[in-house]
Image (tube, rainbow, N blue to C red):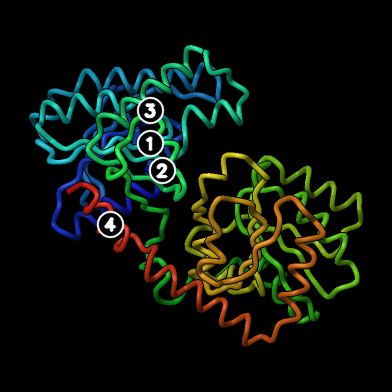
Amino acid sequence: MEYRPYYLARAWIAMGHRVRIVAAAHSHVRRKNPVLSGRSRLDQQIDGIEYTWLGTPDYAGNGWGRIRNMLTFLLRLHYLATALARSFRPDVVIASSTYPLDIWPAHRIARHAGARLLFELHDLWPLSPIELGGYVRWHPFILALQAAENFACRNCDAIVSMLPNVRAHLEAHGMAPEKLHIVPNGTNAAEWRGVPAPLPAPLASTLAALREGGSFVVGFAGAHGLANALDTLLSAAALLRDAPVAIVLVGAGPEKARLQARARDEHLDNVCFLDAVAKEQIPSLLQAFDIAYIGLQRQPLFRFGISPNKLIDYMMAGRPVLQAIEAGNDPVGEARCGLTVAAENPQAVAAGIRTLMAMAPTARDEMGRNGTRFVLENLTYDVLGERFIKACA
Protein backbone atom coordinates (compact mmCIF):
# COMPACT_ATOMS: atom_id res chain seq x y z
CA MET A 1 0.00 0.00 0.00
CA GLU A 2 1.14 3.55 -0.60
CA TYR A 3 2.90 5.38 2.22
CA ARG A 4 0.88 8.64 2.24
CA PRO A 5 -2.69 7.22 2.13
CA TYR A 6 -1.78 4.61 4.75
CA TYR A 7 -0.46 7.08 7.30
CA LEU A 8 -3.15 9.68 6.62
CA ALA A 9 -5.74 6.95 7.13
CA ARG A 10 -4.11 5.95 10.43
CA ALA A 11 -4.22 9.60 11.55
CA TRP A 12 -7.92 9.86 10.64
CA ILE A 13 -8.75 6.65 12.50
CA ALA A 14 -6.99 8.07 15.57
CA MET A 15 -9.36 11.06 15.29
CA GLY A 16 -12.35 8.71 15.39
CA HIS A 17 -13.09 8.43 11.69
CA ARG A 18 -13.75 5.24 9.73
CA VAL A 19 -11.70 4.81 6.56
CA ARG A 20 -11.94 2.50 3.59
CA ILE A 21 -9.33 2.49 0.83
CA VAL A 22 -10.20 1.04 -2.56
CA ALA A 23 -6.99 0.24 -4.43
CA ALA A 24 -5.56 -1.77 -7.29
CA ALA A 25 -3.70 -4.95 -6.32
CA HIS A 26 -0.80 -5.74 -8.63
CA SER A 27 2.97 -6.05 -8.53
CA HIS A 28 3.53 -2.28 -8.29
CA VAL A 29 1.66 -1.97 -4.98
CA ARG A 30 4.51 -1.32 -2.57
CA ARG A 31 3.45 -2.11 0.99
CA LYS A 32 1.80 -5.34 2.17
CA ASN A 33 0.73 -6.29 -1.34
CA PRO A 34 -2.20 -8.71 -0.98
CA VAL A 35 -2.40 -12.02 -2.80
CA LEU A 36 -5.72 -12.27 -4.61
CA SER A 37 -5.08 -15.82 -5.90
CA GLY A 38 -7.08 -15.25 -9.07
CA ARG A 39 -9.90 -13.34 -7.38
CA SER A 40 -11.00 -10.01 -8.79
CA ARG A 41 -11.68 -8.55 -5.33
CA LEU A 42 -10.44 -8.92 -1.77
CA ASP A 43 -11.83 -7.16 1.32
CA GLN A 44 -9.62 -7.07 4.38
CA GLN A 45 -8.64 -4.91 7.35
CA ILE A 46 -5.04 -3.83 7.96
CA ASP A 47 -4.07 -1.78 11.01
CA GLY A 48 -7.65 -0.61 11.47
CA ILE A 49 -8.05 0.47 7.83
CA GLU A 50 -10.69 -1.26 5.72
CA TYR A 51 -9.41 -2.21 2.27
CA THR A 52 -11.09 -3.28 -0.92
CA TRP A 53 -8.44 -4.58 -3.32
CA LEU A 54 -9.40 -4.86 -6.97
CA GLY A 55 -7.30 -7.22 -9.07
CA THR A 56 -5.60 -5.59 -12.05
CA PRO A 57 -3.08 -6.88 -14.59
CA ASP A 58 0.63 -6.42 -13.93
CA TYR A 59 2.61 -4.15 -16.22
CA ALA A 60 6.14 -2.96 -16.92
CA GLY A 61 7.11 0.52 -18.05
CA ASN A 62 4.72 3.25 -19.18
CA GLY A 63 3.21 1.80 -22.34
CA TRP A 64 -0.06 0.08 -23.18
CA GLY A 65 0.29 -2.32 -20.24
CA ARG A 66 0.03 0.51 -17.74
CA ILE A 67 -2.96 2.03 -19.55
CA ARG A 68 -4.64 -1.39 -19.54
CA ASN A 69 -3.99 -1.62 -15.80
CA MET A 70 -5.58 1.77 -15.20
CA LEU A 71 -8.64 0.99 -17.32
CA THR A 72 -9.19 -2.35 -15.60
CA PHE A 73 -9.19 -0.70 -12.19
CA LEU A 74 -11.47 2.13 -13.33
CA LEU A 75 -14.01 -0.22 -14.92
CA ARG A 76 -14.13 -2.46 -11.85
CA LEU A 77 -14.48 0.53 -9.54
CA HIS A 78 -17.23 1.99 -11.72
CA TYR A 79 -19.09 -1.34 -11.61
CA LEU A 80 -18.83 -1.50 -7.79
CA ALA A 81 -19.61 2.18 -7.20
CA THR A 82 -23.26 1.78 -6.19
CA ALA A 83 -22.58 -1.18 -3.91
CA LEU A 84 -19.65 0.60 -2.23
CA ALA A 85 -21.75 3.71 -1.66
CA ARG A 86 -24.58 1.73 -0.08
CA SER A 87 -22.44 -0.60 2.05
CA PHE A 88 -19.94 1.91 3.40
CA ARG A 89 -22.03 5.11 3.21
CA PRO A 90 -19.08 7.55 3.12
CA ASP A 91 -19.39 11.19 4.10
CA VAL A 92 -16.40 12.07 1.90
CA VAL A 93 -15.04 10.33 -1.21
CA ILE A 94 -11.42 11.10 -2.11
CA ALA A 95 -10.08 10.42 -5.61
CA SER A 96 -6.35 9.99 -5.08
CA SER A 97 -3.94 8.55 -7.63
CA THR A 98 -1.14 9.57 -9.97
CA TYR A 99 -3.59 9.99 -12.83
CA PRO A 100 -6.94 11.86 -12.60
CA LEU A 101 -9.14 9.28 -14.36
CA ASP A 102 -10.43 7.87 -11.07
CA ILE A 103 -12.41 11.07 -10.56
CA TRP A 104 -15.28 9.63 -12.59
CA PRO A 105 -15.93 6.46 -10.54
CA ALA A 106 -15.25 8.49 -7.36
CA HIS A 107 -17.92 10.98 -8.49
CA ARG A 108 -20.31 8.09 -9.05
CA ILE A 109 -19.71 6.76 -5.52
CA ALA A 110 -20.11 10.24 -4.00
CA ARG A 111 -23.34 10.87 -5.91
CA HIS A 112 -24.93 7.59 -4.77
CA ALA A 113 -23.79 8.15 -1.17
CA GLY A 114 -24.70 11.85 -1.02
CA ALA A 115 -21.07 12.49 -0.01
CA ARG A 116 -18.65 15.33 -0.59
CA LEU A 117 -16.15 14.74 -3.39
CA LEU A 118 -12.48 15.60 -2.95
CA PHE A 119 -9.69 15.30 -5.53
CA GLU A 120 -6.14 14.76 -4.26
CA LEU A 121 -3.59 15.92 -6.79
CA HIS A 122 -0.29 14.00 -6.69
CA ASP A 123 1.23 14.80 -10.08
CA LEU A 124 -0.01 17.05 -12.86
CA TRP A 125 -1.45 14.75 -15.48
CA PRO A 126 -1.68 15.20 -18.44
CA LEU A 127 1.03 17.85 -18.13
CA SER A 128 3.60 15.33 -16.84
CA PRO A 129 3.33 12.88 -19.77
CA ILE A 130 3.31 15.82 -22.19
CA GLU A 131 6.40 17.56 -20.80
CA LEU A 132 8.33 14.48 -19.65
CA GLY A 133 7.03 11.73 -21.92
CA GLY A 134 6.76 13.62 -25.19
CA TYR A 135 3.04 12.97 -25.69
CA VAL A 136 1.16 15.38 -27.95
CA ARG A 137 -1.90 17.15 -26.59
CA TRP A 138 -4.27 15.57 -29.11
CA HIS A 139 -3.26 11.98 -28.26
CA PRO A 140 -6.48 10.14 -27.22
CA PHE A 141 -5.04 9.19 -23.82
CA ILE A 142 -3.95 12.78 -23.17
CA LEU A 143 -7.38 14.08 -24.18
CA ALA A 144 -9.00 11.67 -21.71
CA LEU A 145 -6.63 12.80 -18.94
CA GLN A 146 -7.36 16.45 -19.69
CA ALA A 147 -11.10 15.83 -19.61
CA ALA A 148 -10.70 14.14 -16.21
CA GLU A 149 -8.61 17.01 -14.80
CA ASN A 150 -11.14 19.55 -16.06
CA PHE A 151 -14.00 17.54 -14.55
CA ALA A 152 -12.22 17.37 -11.19
CA CYS A 153 -11.52 21.11 -11.17
CA ARG A 154 -15.15 21.98 -11.96
CA ASN A 155 -17.06 19.37 -9.98
CA CYS A 156 -15.12 18.55 -6.79
CA ASP A 157 -16.08 20.15 -3.50
CA ALA A 158 -12.37 20.56 -2.65
CA ILE A 159 -8.95 19.85 -4.14
CA VAL A 160 -5.90 18.90 -2.07
CA SER A 161 -2.47 19.24 -3.68
CA MET A 162 1.05 18.43 -2.56
CA LEU A 163 2.36 21.07 -5.01
CA PRO A 164 2.40 24.54 -3.42
CA ASN A 165 2.35 26.57 -6.66
CA VAL A 166 -0.41 24.80 -8.54
CA ARG A 167 -3.22 27.32 -8.05
CA ALA A 168 -2.96 29.17 -11.38
CA HIS A 169 -2.87 25.91 -13.33
CA LEU A 170 -5.97 24.52 -11.65
CA GLU A 171 -7.91 27.77 -11.89
CA ALA A 172 -7.15 27.84 -15.62
CA HIS A 173 -8.92 24.47 -15.83
CA GLY A 174 -12.02 25.56 -13.97
CA MET A 175 -11.25 25.33 -10.24
CA ALA A 176 -12.84 27.94 -7.98
CA PRO A 177 -10.10 29.64 -5.87
CA GLU A 178 -11.58 28.68 -2.50
CA LYS A 179 -11.48 24.95 -3.30
CA LEU A 180 -7.69 24.54 -3.11
CA HIS A 181 -5.89 23.22 -0.01
CA ILE A 182 -2.14 22.51 0.10
CA VAL A 183 -1.16 19.41 2.09
CA PRO A 184 2.45 18.37 1.36
CA ASN A 185 4.13 15.04 1.95
CA GLY A 186 5.01 14.15 5.52
CA THR A 187 6.37 11.56 7.89
CA ASN A 188 5.23 9.28 10.66
CA ALA A 189 6.91 10.76 13.73
CA ALA A 190 6.56 7.49 15.66
CA GLU A 191 9.09 5.86 13.33
CA TRP A 192 11.74 8.28 14.62
CA ARG A 193 11.18 7.70 18.33
CA GLY A 194 13.26 5.39 20.46
CA VAL A 195 16.54 3.71 19.65
CA PRO A 196 16.97 3.32 15.86
CA ALA A 197 17.68 -0.08 14.35
CA PRO A 198 21.44 -0.62 13.95
CA LEU A 199 23.09 -0.72 10.55
CA PRO A 200 24.48 -3.95 9.08
CA ALA A 201 27.97 -4.47 10.48
CA PRO A 202 29.87 -4.13 7.16
CA LEU A 203 28.13 -0.86 6.31
CA ALA A 204 28.62 0.53 9.81
CA SER A 205 32.31 -0.38 9.67
CA THR A 206 32.77 1.38 6.34
CA LEU A 207 31.16 4.59 7.60
CA ALA A 208 33.14 4.47 10.85
CA ALA A 209 36.40 4.02 8.92
CA LEU A 210 35.65 7.08 6.79
CA ARG A 211 35.09 9.21 9.87
CA GLU A 212 38.14 7.85 11.68
CA GLY A 213 40.16 8.69 8.58
CA GLY A 214 39.16 12.34 8.94
CA SER A 215 36.66 12.47 6.07
CA PHE A 216 33.74 14.87 6.04
CA VAL A 217 30.89 12.57 4.97
CA VAL A 218 28.44 13.84 2.35
CA GLY A 219 25.67 11.28 2.05
CA PHE A 220 22.90 10.46 -0.38
CA ALA A 221 20.31 7.84 0.57
CA GLY A 222 17.72 6.65 -1.92
CA ALA A 223 17.03 5.39 -5.40
CA HIS A 224 19.84 5.70 -7.95
CA GLY A 225 17.72 6.88 -10.87
CA LEU A 226 18.01 9.44 -13.64
CA ALA A 227 15.71 11.85 -11.83
CA ASN A 228 18.16 12.13 -8.92
CA ALA A 229 20.91 13.62 -11.15
CA LEU A 230 23.65 11.71 -9.35
CA ASP A 231 26.12 12.35 -12.17
CA THR A 232 26.20 15.90 -10.85
CA LEU A 233 27.29 14.62 -7.45
CA LEU A 234 30.04 12.49 -9.02
CA SER A 235 31.26 15.47 -11.04
CA ALA A 236 31.33 17.50 -7.82
CA ALA A 237 33.38 14.71 -6.22
CA ALA A 238 35.96 15.12 -8.98
CA LEU A 239 36.23 18.82 -8.07
CA LEU A 240 36.77 17.89 -4.41
CA ARG A 241 39.73 15.54 -4.81
CA ASP A 242 41.88 17.94 -2.79
CA ALA A 243 39.44 18.11 0.14
CA PRO A 244 38.95 15.62 3.00
CA VAL A 245 35.49 14.75 1.71
CA ALA A 246 33.88 11.33 1.24
CA ILE A 247 30.82 11.12 -1.02
CA VAL A 248 28.68 8.17 0.11
CA LEU A 249 25.77 6.91 -2.00
CA VAL A 250 23.51 4.40 -0.27
CA GLY A 251 20.76 2.59 -2.13
CA ALA A 252 19.91 0.77 -5.32
CA GLY A 253 18.39 1.61 -8.67
CA PRO A 254 18.71 1.40 -12.44
CA GLU A 255 21.60 3.86 -12.63
CA LYS A 256 23.76 2.41 -9.87
CA ALA A 257 25.89 0.05 -11.98
CA ARG A 258 26.64 2.80 -14.51
CA LEU A 259 27.51 5.28 -11.77
CA GLN A 260 29.84 2.76 -10.13
CA ALA A 261 31.55 2.12 -13.46
CA ARG A 262 31.99 5.86 -13.99
CA ALA A 263 33.51 6.28 -10.53
CA ARG A 264 35.98 3.46 -11.25
CA ASP A 265 36.89 4.77 -14.71
CA GLU A 266 37.51 8.28 -13.40
CA HIS A 267 39.35 7.05 -10.28
CA LEU A 268 36.97 8.84 -7.95
CA ASP A 269 38.49 7.39 -4.80
CA ASN A 270 36.49 9.79 -2.65
CA VAL A 271 33.20 8.16 -3.75
CA CYS A 272 31.78 5.14 -1.93
CA PHE A 273 28.72 3.09 -2.97
CA LEU A 274 26.88 1.11 -0.29
CA ASP A 275 23.92 -1.25 -0.40
CA ALA A 276 20.42 -0.12 0.46
CA VAL A 277 19.31 -0.46 4.06
CA ALA A 278 15.94 -1.36 5.56
CA LYS A 279 13.51 1.49 6.23
CA GLU A 280 13.87 1.12 10.01
CA GLN A 281 17.66 1.56 9.66
CA ILE A 282 17.41 4.91 7.85
CA PRO A 283 17.68 6.99 11.07
CA SER A 284 20.94 5.22 11.99
CA LEU A 285 22.30 5.67 8.48
CA LEU A 286 21.56 9.39 8.33
CA GLN A 287 23.26 10.00 11.67
CA ALA A 288 26.51 8.87 10.01
CA PHE A 289 26.34 11.74 7.48
CA ASP A 290 27.84 15.16 8.17
CA ILE A 291 25.54 16.60 5.53
CA ALA A 292 22.79 15.00 3.46
CA TYR A 293 22.53 15.61 -0.27
CA ILE A 294 19.42 15.76 -2.42
CA GLY A 295 19.37 16.66 -6.10
CA LEU A 296 16.97 16.47 -9.01
CA GLN A 297 17.21 17.03 -12.71
CA ARG A 298 16.27 20.48 -13.95
CA GLN A 299 12.65 20.02 -15.04
CA PRO A 300 10.04 22.63 -16.03
CA LEU A 301 7.40 20.76 -14.02
CA PHE A 302 9.16 21.68 -10.80
CA ARG A 303 7.86 25.23 -11.29
CA PHE A 304 4.76 24.00 -9.45
CA GLY A 305 6.85 23.07 -6.41
CA ILE A 306 8.27 19.94 -4.80
CA SER A 307 7.66 17.90 -1.64
CA PRO A 308 10.25 15.08 -1.56
CA ASN A 309 9.94 12.36 1.09
CA LYS A 310 13.74 11.95 1.09
CA LEU A 311 14.19 15.55 2.20
CA ILE A 312 11.76 15.04 5.08
CA ASP A 313 13.81 12.06 6.26
CA TYR A 314 16.98 14.16 6.16
CA MET A 315 15.30 16.88 8.19
CA MET A 316 13.87 14.48 10.78
CA ALA A 317 17.37 13.04 11.25
CA GLY A 318 18.66 16.52 12.06
CA ARG A 319 21.11 16.58 9.18
CA PRO A 320 22.09 19.85 7.47
CA VAL A 321 20.96 19.52 3.85
CA LEU A 322 22.59 20.45 0.56
CA GLN A 323 19.75 20.74 -1.95
CA ALA A 324 20.61 20.96 -5.67
CA ILE A 325 17.12 21.57 -6.98
CA GLU A 326 15.50 24.41 -8.92
CA ALA A 327 11.80 24.54 -8.13
CA GLY A 328 8.93 26.90 -7.51
CA ASN A 329 9.50 26.52 -3.77
CA ASP A 330 12.56 26.11 -1.57
CA PRO A 331 11.73 23.85 1.39
CA VAL A 332 15.33 23.89 2.64
CA GLY A 333 15.38 27.68 2.67
CA GLU A 334 11.95 27.84 4.27
CA ALA A 335 13.06 25.54 7.10
CA ARG A 336 16.54 27.14 7.34
CA CYS A 337 18.03 23.66 7.44
CA GLY A 338 20.84 23.89 4.88
CA LEU A 339 21.89 25.37 1.55
CA THR A 340 20.16 25.38 -1.84
CA VAL A 341 22.30 25.50 -4.99
CA ALA A 342 21.66 25.29 -8.72
CA ALA A 343 20.46 21.98 -10.12
CA GLU A 344 22.77 19.88 -12.30
CA ASN A 345 25.69 22.23 -11.58
CA PRO A 346 28.75 20.35 -10.24
CA GLN A 347 30.64 23.57 -9.46
CA ALA A 348 27.71 24.83 -7.36
CA VAL A 349 27.43 21.50 -5.53
CA ALA A 350 31.17 21.40 -4.79
CA ALA A 351 31.07 25.01 -3.56
CA GLY A 352 28.07 24.20 -1.36
CA ILE A 353 29.91 21.27 0.21
CA ARG A 354 32.95 23.44 0.89
CA THR A 355 30.75 26.12 2.45
CA LEU A 356 29.03 23.68 4.78
CA MET A 357 32.30 21.98 5.66
CA ALA A 358 33.86 25.34 6.58
CA MET A 359 31.04 26.18 9.00
CA ALA A 360 31.42 25.69 12.71
CA PRO A 361 29.90 22.37 13.82
CA THR A 362 27.51 24.32 16.04
CA ALA A 363 26.15 26.17 12.99
CA ARG A 364 25.55 22.92 11.13
CA ASP A 365 23.91 21.45 14.23
CA GLU A 366 21.56 24.42 14.36
CA MET A 367 20.58 23.80 10.74
CA GLY A 368 19.81 20.21 11.63
CA ARG A 369 17.68 21.23 14.61
CA ASN A 370 15.80 23.72 12.42
CA GLY A 371 14.91 20.94 10.01
CA THR A 372 13.64 18.59 12.71
CA ARG A 373 11.65 21.35 14.35
CA PHE A 374 10.06 22.34 11.03
CA VAL A 375 8.94 18.77 10.29
CA LEU A 376 7.51 18.20 13.77
CA GLU A 377 5.55 21.43 13.60
CA ASN A 378 4.34 21.15 10.00
CA LEU A 379 4.90 17.79 8.32
CA THR A 380 3.94 14.90 10.59
CA TYR A 381 0.94 12.87 9.45
CA ASP A 382 -0.91 13.80 12.62
CA VAL A 383 -0.65 17.47 11.63
CA LEU A 384 -1.31 16.82 7.93
CA GLY A 385 -4.25 14.54 8.72
CA GLU A 386 -5.97 17.38 10.57
CA ARG A 387 -5.32 19.76 7.67
CA PHE A 388 -6.73 17.22 5.22
CA ILE A 389 -9.86 16.68 7.32
CA LYS A 390 -10.46 20.45 7.36
CA ALA A 391 -10.33 20.39 3.55
CA CYS A 392 -13.08 17.76 3.58
CA ALA A 393 -15.45 19.84 5.71
Amino acid carrying mark 4 in the image:
Arg
Q: Which residue is mark 3?
A: 149
| Residue in view at x 75 percent, y 61 percent | 349
Q: Are marks 1 and 2 in contact (CB under 8 Å)?
A: yes
- The percent position of residue 358, horizontal first and vertical second, equals 76, 81
Earlier-in-chain disc, 4 versus 1 = 1
Q: Which residue is mark 4?
A: 387
Q: Nearer the viewer, mark 4 or mark 1?
A: 1
- The percent position of residue 314, horizontal first and vertical second, equals 55, 66
| Mark 3 vs mark 1, CA separation in Å | 11 Å
Q: Which residue is mark 1?
A: 171
Q: Which residue is mark 2?
A: 167
Amino acid carrying mark 2 in the image:
Arg
In this view, the residue in front, 282 or 186, is: 186
Q: Nearer the viewer, mark 3 or mark 1?
A: 1
- Label 1 neighbourhood size at 10 Å, few (<14), some (14-19), many (20+)? some
Earlier-in-chain disc, 3 versus 4 = 3
Amino acid carrying mark 1 in the image:
Glu
Name the secondary structure under disc 2. Answer: helix
